[in-house]
Image (cartoon, rainbow, N blue to C red):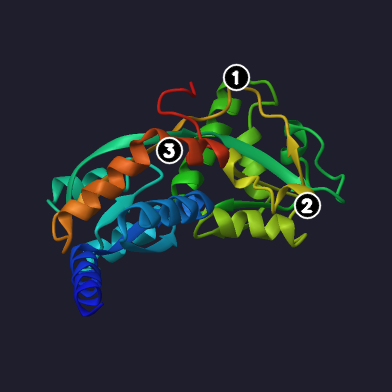
Amino acid sequence: MKTQLLISTLLLSVGSASAASLTVFAAASLTDAFAEIGKAFDAKTGNTTTFQFAGSQALRTQLDNGARADVYASANNAQFDPLVKSGLVTGGQPFLSNRLAVIAPKNNAKVQTLADLSKPGVKLVIADKAVPVGDYTRRMISAIDKSGAYGKDFSGLFLKNVVSEEPNVRQVALKVQLGEADAAVVYSSDVTPALRPSVRVITLPTRFNQSASYPIGTLKGSASPEAAQAFVKFVLSGEGQAILKKWGFLKPQQVK
């Protein structure tokens, strides 16, 4: 009996010694999907993974200023590549794609079509231009301008209607959920089961939509580089990709 107890204690000691504590910095739009991925990954590996979710630009600033993390997942390359060039992030690769969605409160009929976004008196909420979804939003309205489908100054009228520019996409979606905006631009993956009962999705023609490519990589200063690589591999695995698909994300290059 004492021998069995000793063996069990030794096994637990080995397991706890090999387990790692990981910190993952990830774009706010990944909150639900990565929370589920983290639970599945930890269950398989015995690791403990914690997440810091925020706008990709805010996470990049934190890493530039010395914040410690093991993995960084950004919503665009503009906030990711500089960290690779500076040597803070080791490598990196795209692991999903996303697309934009225009949403409006379900009980607010002010915005019914894309054209309504430029009408006087409409209250719009978007992300700040430094936030990846804010950049994609501005590319979207620029594409609409070039088409001439809704007049020559759609983007100017659209931006005039903006009453708030948020630091991350989840804050944008929350403004609509709370009824503080007539419409907003988010990612299609942000229309989650929790948000869906509160909003309507306005049709956005494919020719105006934007492809958002998300890269992921490990931090050079990671205290657990092998575990960090294992997390990235899990995200790229069939199981990880299935979870991302469940939460409305697409494979890289699927959106055009």
Quick one: 38 or 161, which is closer to the camera?
38
Q: Position of residue 238 (x, y in %)?
A: 40, 33
Q: Label 2, on which residue?
A: 198
Q: Residue furthest front?
A: 1
Q: What secondary structure is marked by label 2? A: helix
Q: Nearer the viewer, mark 3 or mark 1?
A: 3
| Residue 21 versus residue 141 in the image, above or below | below
The span from disc 3 to disc 2 (Cα, nearest Å) is 30 Å
- Who comes first in sequence, dot 3 or dot 2? 2
Looking at the image, residue 73 sits to the left or right of residue 206; the answer is: left
The span from disc 2 to disc 1 (Cα, nearest Å) is 31 Å
| Residue 78 versus residue 181 in the image, above or below | above
Quick one: 15 or 174, which is closer to the camera?
15
Q: Position of residue 56 (x, y in %)?
A: 39, 53
Q: Label 1, on which residue?
A: 147
Q: What secondary structure is marked by label 1? A: helix
Amino acid type assigned to the residue bearing label 3 in the image: Glu
Identity of the residue drawn at 49% across and 60% down: 167
Image quadrant in which you'd find residue 200? top right
Identity of the residue drawn at 13% across and 51% down: 86
Image quadrant in which you'd find residue 88? bottom left
- Who comes first in sequence, dot 2 or dot 1? 1
| Residue 93 versus residue 152 in the image, above or below | below
The numbered disc on residue 239 is 3
Q: Position of residue 41 (x, y in %)?
A: 37, 52
Specify few, some or many for label 1: CA neighbours under 10 Å numbering under 14, 14-19, or 20 or more. Answer: few
Amino acid type assigned to the residue bearing label 2 in the image: Ser
Q: What secondary structure is marked by label 3? A: helix
Quick one: 111 or 242, which is closer to the camera?
242
Q: Position of residue 140 (x, y in %)?
A: 55, 33
Specify few, some or many for label 2: CA neighbours under 10 Å numbering under 14, 14-19, or 20 or more. Answer: some
Looking at the image, residue 95 sits to the left or right of residue 35; the answer is: left
